[in-house]
Amino acid sequence: MTEHLEHLRMVEALLFAAAEPLDEESIFQRLPGHPEVGPLLAELQEMYARRGVNLVRRAGKWMFQTAPDLAFLLQQEVQEERRLSRAAQETLAIIAYHQPVTRAEIEDIRGVTVSKGTVDLLMEIGWVRIMGRRQTPGKPVTYGVSEQFLVEFGLESVKDLPGIDELKAAGLLDAEPPESFRLLPVDEVEEDAEEDVPLPFDDPVEVGRG
């Protein structure tokens, strides 16, 4: 067996056994001889493209997932879907497109007060996380979308976020957004991020650098 094929099998084994998605650096560090990981992942992705499971990249990390057209096979029971309230939908959209953003900034964009419960709900679901503190008076906490949000919505990074029409089609934005709502260019999002200081317990999400 050639060294290339052996490394291919090792990468495959690591991804199958991993409890969570792996980034390329983690895979690289575990492989003997430290081969170039990118081409190995690309080859595996092609190998699994037409199989029951696919190799996909989500939030800058790699994972196996069930092929989309076979997801129905794993459904054991029908669960009642509960839609997010309009307030939660708008708050999530604002956080996603304006991150890092403070509660006061969310309220300014929406034009109404944002209840603590709305943000807490989005954090409980796992779609929103605390990113750091804004270096302004009071040092307010800033929020952004989490890695789980990117994974569950099939996004590589915030660069892949849909436009307003796509948000409506996906049910994330049922009503017309507030007049003050706008989509920030990715470079503006990244520029704002530099103003924040991460909290000690933060594990920053990759934003637009995948």
Image (tube, grey):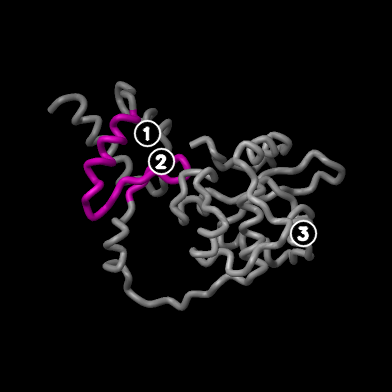
Which SS class for mark 1? helix
Q: Which residue is mark 2?
A: 22
Q: Identify the residue at image location x=32%, y=73%.
A: 76
Q: Identify the residue at image location x=15%, y=25%.
A: 2
Mark 3 or mark 1, whichever is nearer to me: 3
Which SS class for mark 3? helix
Q: Amino acid at mark 2?
A: Leu
> Mark 2: few, some, or many residues within 10 Å (few <14, many ≥20)?
some
Report the front residue among 82 and 74: 82
Q: Which residue is mark 1?
A: 27
Where residue 34 appears, x then y in whole percent? 33, 23
Where residue 25 appears, x then y in whole percent? 42, 31
In the figure, is residue 196 to the left or right of 206?
right
Report the front residue among 14 and 52: 52
Q: Earlier in the sequence, mark 1 or mark 2?
A: 2
In the rendered structure, which segment of residues is drawn in magenta? 37-64
Q: Against 119, is 44 above or below?
A: above
Mark 2 or mark 3, whichever is nearer to me: 3
Asked where in the image residue 73 lies, by quadrant, the reply is bottom left
Query: Does the magenta segment cover residue 161?
Result: no
Q: Amino acid at mark 3?
A: Glu
Q: Earlier in the sequence, mark 2 or mark 3?
A: 2
Q: CA distance from mark 2 to mark 3?
A: 36 Å
Is the residue under label 2 in contact with that under label 1 (CB below 8 Å)?
A: yes
Q: CA distance from mark 1 to mark 2?
A: 7 Å
Q: What numbered label is drawn on residue 107?
A: 3
Q: CA distance from mark 3 to mark 1?
A: 42 Å
Quick one: which residue is furthest to the left in this view? 1
Q: Against 176, is 131 above or below?
A: above
